[in-house]
Amino acid sequence: MVNSHGRFVWYELMTTDIETAKAFYGNVVGWGTRDAAMPGLSYSLFTVGDTPVTGLMKLPEDMRRTGATPHWIGYVGVDDVDAAVDRIKQLGGAVHVPPTDVPNISRFSVVVDPQMAHLRWSRG
């Protein structure tokens, strides 16, 4: 992604009911869906025509156990995920998922700011 540093580059819906979400967003905004599962991860893309516009995945059980509810999350592009994560920690934020590679897609991390607002960094 050229010149994506500091910009929202992707959005993802984490939900407990994938099929209802597909129907709802299909009816509300006309999005289609396409399977994009990877080994060990069920994943779908919402699409406009053939173009992916956002992701859709089941809210992980470990997140549900800690009180998380269905939500949208945005990914912000950064030039260097590891450096951005280090800076988050220096400024009082926390890391929920350390920098992780998604082969052939991106490198990402889940962080929270000092007020506990979640954000994902992405480079890809």
Image: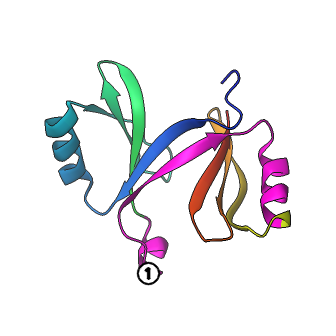
The structure residue drawn at horizontal position 47% and vertical position 72%, both measured from the top left corner, is 63
Q: Residues within 10 Å of mark 1 (few under 14, many from 20)?
A: few
The structure residue drawn at horizontal position 57% and vertical position 61%, both measured from the top left corner, is 118
Q: Residue 74's spot in the image, x, y percent?
A: 52, 47
Q: Could you tell whether 99 is left or right of 56 in the image?
A: right
- Judge whether residue 61 can be spotted in this image: yes
Colour setting? rainbow
Give the extent of the magenta segment.
60-89
The structure residue drawn at horizontal position 25% and vertical position 31%, both measured from the top left corner, is 31
* 66 drawn magenta: yes
Quarter occupied by residue 1: top right
The structure residue drawn at horizontal position 81% and vertical position 41%, both measured from the top left corner, is 80
Q: Amino acid at mark 1?
A: Arg
Mark 1 sits on what residue?
65
* The one of 14 and 89 positioned closer to us in this rendering: 89
- Label 1 SS: helix
Give the answer, above or below, for where 80 lies relative to 89. Answer: above
The C terminus lies in quadrant: top right
Q: Residue 76's spot in the image, x, y percent?
A: 62, 42
Quarter occupied by residue 92: bottom right
Give the answer, above or below, for where 81 lies relative to 4. Answer: below
Q: Residue 122's spot in the image, x, y percent?
A: 66, 42
